[in-house]
Image: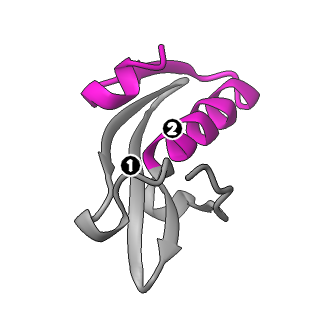
Amino acid sequence: MNMRYAIEHQPELQRFRIVQQGEEALLEYQLLGDSVDFWRTFVPDALRGQGMAEQLVRHGLAWAEQKQLAVQASCWYVQKFL
């Protein structure tokens, strides 16, 4: 299944999220000056296998590129996209 999900940026919480079926999938980051560290992806068990984590990561990386931020990835999953 390769749906497109609505991704919400919550800069005050330093995260991107997708809400489905009352649950949320997350990509969390920390701004460090002119760089960003994507440190955690989380998808609840009920939502796994639908491509949400990949969409969140690709969206986050596009955002970082648009903002001209250097990208770091403490999260192993995000590292796969760098």
The question of residue 75 being in magenta is answered with yes
Q: Nearer the viewer, mark 1 or mark 2?
A: 2
Q: Give the magenta-colored segment's residue range.
A: 53-82
Which residue in the structure is indicated by mark 2?
A: 57
x 60%, y 23%: residue: 69
- The Cα–Cα distance between marks 1 and 2, rounded to whole angstroms, is 10 Å
* Mark with earlier residue (1, 2): 1
Q: In which quarter of the image is residue 47?
A: bottom left
The image shows residue 18 at horizontal and vertical percentages of: 52, 65
Q: What element carries label 1?
A: strand
Residue in view at x 45 percent, y 83 percent:
21
| Lateral position of residue 3 relative to residue 52, left or right | right
Q: How many marks?
A: 2
Q: In this view, does 39 lie above or below 21?
A: above
Q: Which residue is drawn at 64% across and 61% down?
A: 5
The one nearer the camera, 49 or 62, is: 49
Q: Main secondary structure of the magenta part?
A: helix
Other-residue count near label 1 (Cα within 10 Å), few / some / many at <14 / 14–19 / ≥20: many
Residue of label 1: 28
On screen, residue 73 versus residue 17, left or right, reads left
**Three-letter code for the amino acid on which mark 1 is drawn:** Glu
Q: Residue furthest bottom?
A: 22
